[in-house]
Amino acid sequence: QVHLVESGGGWVQAGGSLRLSCAASGSIFSINDMGWYRQAPGKQRDMVARITSVGTTTYADSVKGRFTISRDNAKNTMYLQMNSLKPEDTAVYYCNADIKQGWRTLSRAYWGQGTQVTVSS
């Protein structure tokens, strides 16, 4: 069994900052790519940022220069530093990870339960 648990969400005024964390636990052999996604009410879930196991990053255009994704492989934890937040960043933020549970097993995607981020104008 594998669990992803997000933390760090909350309410902030526009221009403020938040730092999200995602901790993976359970029967984990290795973690490949990890990423943050977000879903606003009535909208689809979109990619915010992704990071490979060696630290290569990808960002959505809307967050480039404001958000920074990172990970600590020793702790099986990923972070999202969000600066200069805007009201349009308001959404539920989900953690995603591609995880192998054994040397001979295929990896599969896991999702966290989500954490709410609300940015007021």
Image: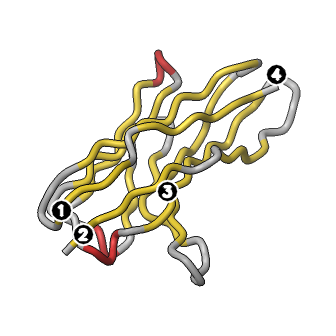
Give the SS element for disc 1: strand
Residue under circle 1?
A: 13
- Residue 49 lies, in percent from the top left, at 42, 58
Residue 20 at x, y = what percent?
38, 42
Q: Secondary structure at mark 4?
A: loop
Residue indicated by mark 3 = 93
Which picture quadrant has residue 11?
Answer: bottom left
Residue at numbered disc 4: 102
| 120 up-or-down from 101: above or below | below
Between 58 and 96, the residue placed more toward the observer is 96
Query: Which numbered disc flags the more N-terminal residue, 2 or 1?
Result: 1
Q: Decide: marks 2, 4 in contact (CB < 8 A)?
A: no
> In 3D space, how far apart are the residues under numbered discs 3 and 4 (Cα atoms)?
28 Å
Dot 4: within a 10 Å radius of its alpha carbon, few (fewer than 14), some, or many (20 or more) residues?
Answer: few
Q: Nearer the viewer, mark 3 or mark 1?
A: 1
Question: Residue lying furthest bottom in this view?
Answer: 42
